[in-house]
């Protein structure tokens, strides 16, 4: 029997206050994986949500945080893995205008009411909205149009370091699936619908230099700054090492062979670029990031190509010596730099650390330590010709939206674990609605309708439509 969407949509409209409260409940439960704050408690909350939906659920233990796994058998022809993440970043950034863990609702022009909280957009808001959509289908006396395998991990912000252990335990269950769906807010701040078909890979590492290992400078602690007249500085030495790794503007990586295996754009990328040249608008991204210009003053599609296809070497943070208020003259004994590399096809995670080590050695910086923090994961791509992609596009058009299809996103997610052997599943994000400022103060997701973007009700309706069209997929 076909799903009666009108009944479900009416139910969603009538229960938005209740659904909003459920979003607030989830963001109020801390799950800050880098600080190990509230993560297991949040996993328990998700387990309760799964059971309320009617799933056979369990916490799948790993060497780190558990994966919350749920199976919903609708007796359908199609089975969809729903990838979710329940962990978040810390809340230590200056600039929050609300308590980031209070689940506050604030008016934000031009959107109306928004939920402003850590995890509101990345991605507890979408997670709970998706469950709201599923519960709404059942509340109208109807069955879900697909079987679900819910996979919520608690270490995405740590590079999904133990997710492979879950795959080893649940490979048989996952092999039943036809596709992987990632509930997402797909609209930019102007309301344009963006559909991305991939992610870049990522590797995290740390450079470290101290006086003891170098054999120069203070060995154990910082000393008075006047001693720079006759004592070497590990901090200055590290700065010189960093300067060899890129062009003076920091925009061209000079590490040998860094770009050797970067094989983009592909033929499918070029097909999509022909369409994007007519529709891409850079202004929403600049507005959200508070950025005035892009590298080299590139504009439009030329700037966008850099975003999509350039691998990156990024400094996430660096510190040494005194960073407090006022003055403290000091010659530090140690300097540390956290870095990440974003990988594009066909770069591999395994090549990065040896490449960096070789570069430092060849430039005379053998004393700089390279510490792998997270091996991360590889890039992932899904063809726009996949039936699951077509199902999401169809859902958008049925709701009066024409999506702009991006070959990839510059960010990273562990989609490759689904798309590579042995599963080889297409991975597709989808959903209407808008949110922004992940990892930043005042992260938000839009609740109200009537602004330039969809609100919570339309977001949930889009998930219903996507599930319905997944159920109608044909090979």
Image (spheres, rainbow, N blue to C red):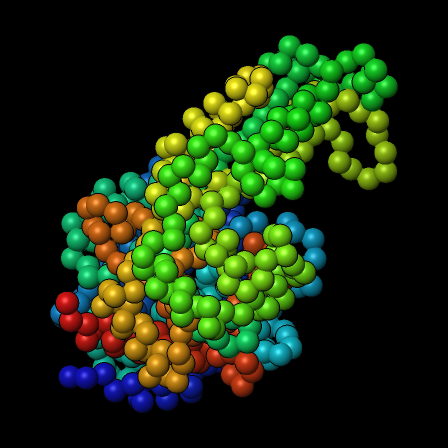
The foreground one among 431 and 475 is 475
Tell me where residue 236 appears, x and y as whole percent.
Answer: 71, 25
With respect to residue 454, does 88 lie above or below?
Answer: above
The foreground one among 27 and 281 is 281
Tell me where residue 295 appears, x and y as whole percent.
Answer: 61, 52
Q: How many labels, in total?
A: 0
Farthest-out residue, top: 215
Tell me where residue 161 appears, x and y as whole percent.
Answer: 39, 40
User: Quick one: quadrant of the C terminus?
Assistant: bottom left
Residue 129 visible in the current orientation = no
* 86 horizontally vs 78: left or right: right
Residue 466 visible in the current orientation = yes
User: Quick one: quadrant of the N terminus?
Assistant: bottom left
Name the image quarter holding residue 250. Answer: top right
* 34 horizontally vs 337: left or right: left
Residue for point 59% across, 58% down: 298
Tell me where residue 149 appears, x and y as whole percent.
Answer: 25, 60
Name the image quarter holding residue 352. Answer: top left
The foreground one among 1 and 471 is 471
Residue for point 25% across, 47% down: 420
Residue for point 24% across, 61% down: 179
Name the image quarter holding residue 217. Answer: top right
Residue for point 59% across, 25% down: 208
């Amino acid at each position: 029997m076909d799903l009666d969407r009108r009944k479900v949509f009416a139910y969603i409209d009538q229960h938005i206050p209740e659904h909003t409260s459920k979003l607030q409940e989830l963001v109020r439960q801390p799950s800050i994986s880098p600080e190990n704050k509230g993560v297991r408690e949040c996993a328990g909350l998700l387990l309760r949500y799964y059971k309320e939906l009617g799933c056979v659920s369990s916490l799948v233990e790993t060497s780190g945080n558990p994966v919350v796994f749920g199976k919903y058998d609708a007796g359908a022809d199609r089975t969809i893995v729903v990838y979710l993440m329940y962990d978040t970043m810390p809340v230590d950034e200056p600039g929050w205008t609300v308590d980031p863990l209070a689940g506050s609702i604030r008016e934000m022009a031009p959107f109306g009411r928004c939920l402003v909280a850590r995890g509101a957009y990345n991605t507890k808001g979408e997670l709970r909205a998706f469950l709201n959509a599923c519960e709404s289908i059942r509340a109208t006396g109807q069955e879900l149009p697909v079987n679900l395998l819910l996979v919520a991990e608690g270490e995405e912000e740590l590079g999904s370091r133990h997710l492979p252990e879950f795959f080893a335990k649940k490979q048989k269950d996952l092999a039943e699936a036809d596709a992987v769906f990632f509930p997402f807010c797909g609209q930019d701040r102007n309301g344009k619908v963006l559909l991305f078909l991939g992610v870049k890979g990522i590797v995290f590492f740390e450079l470290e230099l101290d006086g003891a290992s170098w054999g120069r400078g203070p060995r154990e602690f910082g000393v008075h700054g006047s001693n720079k007249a006759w004592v070497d500085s590990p901090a200055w030495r590290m700065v010189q090492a960093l300067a060899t790794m890129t062009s003076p503007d920091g925009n061209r990586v000079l590490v040998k062979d860094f770009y050797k295996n970067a094989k983009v754009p592909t033929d499918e990328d070029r097909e999509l670029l022909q369409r994007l040249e007519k529709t891409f608008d850079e202004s929403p991204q600049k507005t959200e990031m508070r950025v005035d210009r892009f590298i080299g003053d590139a504009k439009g599609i030329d700037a966008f190509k850099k975003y999509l296809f350039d691998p990156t070497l990024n400094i996430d943070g660096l510190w040494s010596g005194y960073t407090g208020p006022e003055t403290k003259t000091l010659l530090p004994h140690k300097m540390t730099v956290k870095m990440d590399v974003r990988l594009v096809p066909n770069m591999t995670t395994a090549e990065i650390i040896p490449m960096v080590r070789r570069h430092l050695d060849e430039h005379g910086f053998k004393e700089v330590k390279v510490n792998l923090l997270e091996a991360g994961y590889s890039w992932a791509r899904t063809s726009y010709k996949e039936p699951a992609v077509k199902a999401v596009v169809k859902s958008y058009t049925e709701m009066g939206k024409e999506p702009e299809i991006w070959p990839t996103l510059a960010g990273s997610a562990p989609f490759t674990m689904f798309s590579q052997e042995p599963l080889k599943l297409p991975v597709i994000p989808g959903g209407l609605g808008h949110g922004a400022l992940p990892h930043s103060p005042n992260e938000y997701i839009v609740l109200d309708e009537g602004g330039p973007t969809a609100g919570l009700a339309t977001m949930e309706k889009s998930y219903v439509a996507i599930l319905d069209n997944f159920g109608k997929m044909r090979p």
